[in-house]
Image (spheres, grey):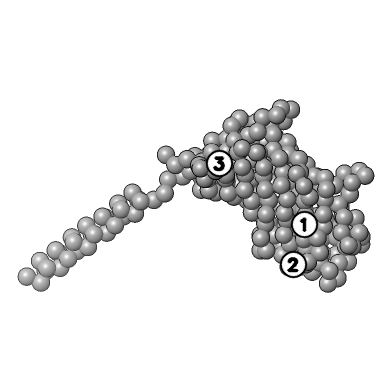
Amino acid sequence: MQKSLRKIALVAGAATAAIGLTAGTASAVPSTVWTVTPTPANFTATNSGNIVLTVNGIPMTCTTSGASGTMQSATGNPATVANINAINFGASGSPCTSVLGNVTTVATTPWTVVAADYNATTGVTTGHVGNVDATVTVGACKFRVTGKASGTYTNSTGALAVNSVSGDLTVVSATSCGAAVPVGAKPTFKGTYLVKQTGTSVIPKIVGSNP
């Protein structure tokens, strides 16, 4: 009798486990399909308003900034929908500035545009600019920033709004910066870029859907 009861318990346990596995698989969220239009395509982006990197409470402001790269449809949660192959900060006659002096920034690319969530009502994709890597020089101070920058993309305007929060980015090295820019500081990167397909007035669209 005890052996029979043990067999029944084992069979019941196996059945319960199988049901649980099936339920877990059925309830799993499917990967988001990100449809980028046009795809694949090249894009350019120009700042709308100031671009500001704030380090240890010190704003470093650029009135001119631009980027270019490629965009493509993708699948995943999250997924890379664009690569930023070049990005510049400041220009001849319009340098980036700070209380410490003019600022020069050299980006190590590619950076990525990563989509994580889509609001069909507003046409806004939430995600981040990833693989951020830039070396900043201001006076004798030179430091390197890496990480990501949280942001959104709006289909109606083509606005890539970068609005990083503390902890997205980190100063990983610093030379001749003293207490002004210490290693381990958590900068913020904020600003808006208007995106268009290269050589046209076409605003790219990003739409996320679950099959």
Quadrant of the rendered image containing residue 196? top right
Q: Mark 2 vs mark 1: which is more N-terminal?
A: 1
Q: Quadrant of the N terminus?
A: bottom left
Residue 123: which disc?
Answer: 3
Q: Residues within 10 Å of mark 1 (few under 14, many from 20)?
A: some
Q: Check disc 3 and report its element: helix, strand or loop.
A: loop
Q: Residues within 10 Å of mark 2 (few under 14, many from 20)?
A: some
Which percent across, then down, holds residue 157?
65, 38
Callout in the foreground (3, 1)? 3
Q: Check disc 1 and report its element: helix, strand or loop.
A: strand
Q: Residue furthest left?
A: 1
Q: Check disc 2 and report its element: helix, strand or loop.
A: loop
Q: What residue is disc 2 on?
A: 185
Compared across the picture, whether 61 is left or right of 69 comes to right
Q: What residue is disc 1 on?
A: 53
Marks 3,1: beta carbons within 8 A: no
Q: Nearer the viewer, residue 193 or 177?
A: 193
The three-letter amino acid code for the residue at tag 1 is Leu
The three-letter amino acid code for the residue at tag 2 is Ala
Which percent across, then down, holds residue 75?
51, 41
User: Whole-Å distance between the Cαs marked 2 and 1?
Assistant: 12 Å
Which percent across, then down, holds residue 135?
81, 55
User: Whole-Å distance between the Cαs marked 3 and 1?
Assistant: 27 Å
Callout in the foreground (2, 1)? 1
